[in-house]
Image (cartoon, grey):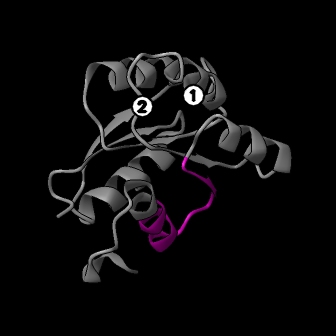
Amino acid sequence: MTDALRILVVDDEPDTLGLIKLTLQTAGYQVQTATGGRQGLRLVREEPFDVVILDIMMPDVSGFDVMRELNTDPTPPPPVIFLTARSGEEDQETGMSLGVSNYLLKPITRGSLLDAINQALGTTPEPDASP
């Protein structure tokens, strides 16, 4: 069941943050948000999350730098999905080399987002999880 699964969404764009949060809540996830990389990094280190959805381009700390920091922690981070407008192949390769489980481009569909979460968790979608 997705009811107990906790997802952290980190994005500096309030509209994107609100839309992703609503999408995930209606799918049954518990969602917490952060408006910047530093806040997201702090939350991941302080609270247990099953998945982190992370923007790359943020004014304080980039998603790449958040991943680099998380990779220095003694315990492995939860699965991280990059959700970004950066479509360059080099950015995708950098993200994957840092250990992100998926690299999604904005704008995103509900189905693509839920599929990426299921893939990150190694689970199959519930029947009502498709668009």
Which residue is painted at 58% across and 45% down in the image?
82
Which residue is painted at 46% across and 73% down in the image?
111
Q: Earlier in the sequence, mark 2 or mark 1?
A: 1
Q: Nearer the viewer, residue 90 or 9?
A: 90
Label 1 CA crowd tier, 10 Å (few <14, some 14–19, many 20+): many
Residue that carries the numbered disc 1 in the rendered image: 67
- Quarter location, residue 44: top left
- Please provide percent x and percent y for residue 118: 39, 63
- Please provide percent x and percent y for residue 29: 24, 55
- Quarter location, residue 35: top left
Horizontal arrangement in the rendering, residue 48 relative to residue 131 (left or right): left
Which residue is painted at 45% across and 62% down in the image?
119
What kind of residue is marked 2?
Pro
- Please provide percent x and percent y for residue 108: 56, 63
Quarter holding the C terminus is: bottom left
Which residue is painted at 64% across and 36% down in the image?
56
Q: Is residue 21 above or below residue 44?
A: below
Q: Nearer the viewer, residue 95 or 16?
A: 95
Contact, mark 2 vs mark 1 (Cβ under 8 Å): yes
Residue 77's disc number: 2
What kind of residue is marked 1?
Met
Callout 1: helix, strand or loop? helix
Label 2 CA crowd tier, 10 Å (few <14, some 14–19, many 20+): many
Magenta stretch: includes residue 107? yes
Magenta stretch: includes residue 83? no
- Please provide percent x and percent y for residue 60: 60, 17
Q: Is residue 70 above or below residue 114?
A: above
Magenta residue span: 101-116
Q: Is residue 34 above or below residue 31?
A: above
Callout 2: helix, strand or loop? loop
